[in-house]
Amino acid sequence: MRTPLQKGEKVLLVTYSSWTSLIVPVLIAIAGLVAAWFLRSYPWTWTIAVAGILYFLLRYFTWKANVWVVTSSRVIDESGLLSHFAKESPLEKINNVSYDQTLMGRLFNYGHVEIQTAAEIGATDYYNVNHPRLLKDTITAAQSDHRNWQYSSQAMQMAAALDGSRRSGASGPGSQGNALSPGTAAELEKLFDLKQKGALSEEEYNKAKSRLLG
């Protein structure tokens, strides 16, 4: 992968197009070697073998350069051997991931993966993907982990802001120090997490927060 990772970003999966796309180049290289062997009395026949091998190497390195990468924050589609094309889909912008396979795709484990995003372009299609179900499942799991991390980070930021507010409000002469206790901050974080997941309504969340803050 040639796209640089962001700070703290981790690669979860790297997958390629189906290896079946290399069958024809392999056969051409073998045919060139066989022809050169049986016609070895002619010096020019080895050019056929060299041409077949070069064709296979070109297709192989092109196959290696075309990748789909799932990281902890995005899905990256890269292609191009001498040139370079890269397209990114942030996990939080992905609405749905689906895949389908033909009969041959099921036999050789490749297929079509479609990613529905919130962007203007709508759907992004990946064709001839090796292990399409693994790609789909990895994206779904990465989305869940990324969402949980966002909820936790937002909850911690909110608790820290409330704590700072209480500290600044109690910093005058004769104040008793009404800073949030670690237990209260943790409870606020849990409440915020539940609200973000839809388990608590806005009204229920505000009531529970008021009880905690007294």
Image (cartoon, helix red, strand yellow):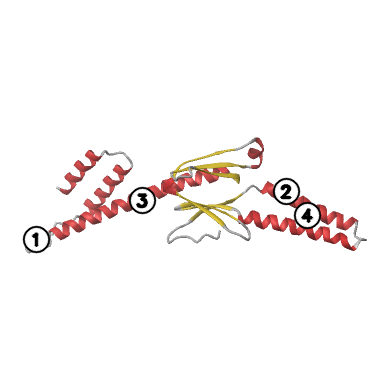
Where residue 7 sits, quadrant-wise, is bottom left
Q: CA distance from mark 4 to mark 3?
A: 51 Å
* Residue for badge 1: 175
Tags 1 and 4 touching, CB below 8 Å: no
Frontmost of labels 3 and 1 is: 3
| Residue placed most toward the observer, 180 or 84 | 84
Q: What residue do we see at 26% from left, 51% from top?
A: 186
177 lies left or right of 70: left
- Numbered label attached to residue 23: 2
Q: CA distance from mark 1 to mark 4?
A: 84 Å
SS of the residue under disc 3 = helix
* Residue for badge 4: 29
* Residue for badge 3: 150
- The type of residue carrying mark 2 is Ile
Sort mark 1 into few (<14), some (14-19) or many (20+) by Cα contacts within 10 Å: few
21 lies left or right of 27: left
